[in-house]
Amino acid sequence: MADLGNPQNTIDVLRRHQFTFQKKFGQNFLIDPRVLEKIIRAAQVGRDDFVLEIGPGIGTMTQYLAEAAREVAAVEIDDKLIPILEETLKGYDNVTIIHGDILKVDVEKLVQEKNQGRPVKVVANLPYYITTPIIMGLFESHVPLDSITIMVQKEVADRMRVGPGTKDYGALSLAVQYYARPEIVANVPPNCFIPRPAVGSAVIRLTRHEAPPVQVQDEQLMFRLIRGAFNQRRKTLVNALRNAPGLGLSREEAEAALDRLGLPLNIRGEALTLEQFAGLANLLSAKSEGNTGG
Ligand code: SAM
């Protein structure tokens, strides 16, 4: 089958199948072989690897992955793309196409079947409208992960890797950095895709931490605190937490916790590091355990 890294071959396939792009599925197909090669290199895909690809489109990156990996499973939602994928990937016996919504597929079961539960590499040019739920879903599930190497909107890649004191810092930065080490691999301009997206893109590699970088007794509480802090990011942390649903925290309790951590009472959530959010969660979970204990 023709190499789809060559843009003319992509155009031929699209024409022959009279394919029309669906905006609602975030369809922007890669047509630049240098970018494709960069993604495969950054993902460090090797002969022993099982790779999960999200949204294969017409199978361009899938071809590159199939050449490099032991086995590839690719999950595609658009039924119009399934017959195209069957054609473009005909020459590969190590690719399984799964027709479905990645947010509904049981990835844990898939990885158990295909990789005996060993860590998987996820590689994708993601549909941008669901970047965050896909990434968070993977991290929060019990799927054993080695790394996630993905094309995302440039601004979202920036949000994933920045620390306190920048406008892009937020709940996504903290969540990603709790689970993984982010590295930008490449900035990718709109002309590397067909059709061209309205925004710049970047490839980011998220390498899963073997152990979390901070010790936290109650992860869920830490993420509730983080969400509470950034839902009202212009307020002081004390006011944001006092108003946050589900936390049940009084002003006095929030102020006492900040005081114990040596933080000023008028600090905003956007100034806290991951370590400080973990510290806050540990203080507050110790307090609520103390309460239940009488
Ligand atoms: N990998 C291809 C490439 O690089 O040329 C296509 C990438 S395109 C940005 C995103 C792909 O994800 C599209 O093929 C789209 O149909 C598919 N997609 C969108 N939402 C999806 C979902 N919920 N589950 C699985 N695939 C999805």
Image (spheres, rainbow, N blue to C red):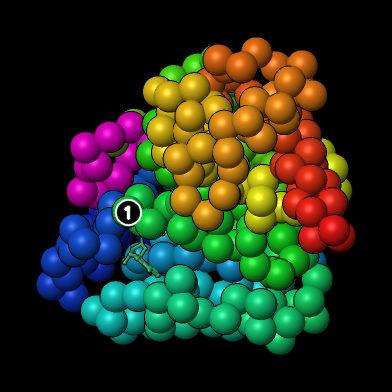
- Categorize mark 1 by other alpha carbons within 10 Å: few (<14), some (14-19), many (20+): some
Quarter of the N terminus within the rendering: bottom left
| Residue 265 counted in the magenta span | no
Relative depth, front residue between 191 and 260 = 260
Residue at figure coordinates x 40%, y 75% from the top left: 101
Q: Quadrant of the C terminus?
A: bottom right
Q: Residue 258 vs residue 116: left or right? A: left
Residue at label 1?
129
Q: Residue at x 28, y 56 (%)?
A: 26
At 54% from the left and 27% from the top, the residue drawn is 237
The span picked out in magenta is: 191-202
- 200 relative to 139, above or below: above
Q: Is mark 1 within 8 Å of ligand 1?
A: yes
Q: How many marks?
A: 1
Q: Is residue 208 visible?
A: no
Residue 81's image quarter? Answer: bottom left
59 versus 5 height, above or below: below
Relative image position of residue 268 (x, y in whole percent): 53, 21
Residue 91 percent across, percent down from the top left: 50, 79
- Name which residue type carries label 1: Tyr
Q: Secondary structure at mark 1?
A: helix
Residue 17 horizontal side relative to residue 246, left or right: left
Name the spot of residue 290 as percent of width and height, x first. Answer: 84, 51
Residue 136 visible in the snapshot: yes
Q: Is residue 193 magenta?
A: yes
Q: Is residue 49 above or below residue 99?
A: above
In the depicted structure, whether residue 210 falls above or below residue 25: above
Q: Residue at x 71, y 27 (%)?
A: 256
State left or right for residue 165 relative to residue 47: left
Q: In the rendered image, which quarter is residue 146 located in?
A: bottom right
Ligand 1: image quarter: bottom left
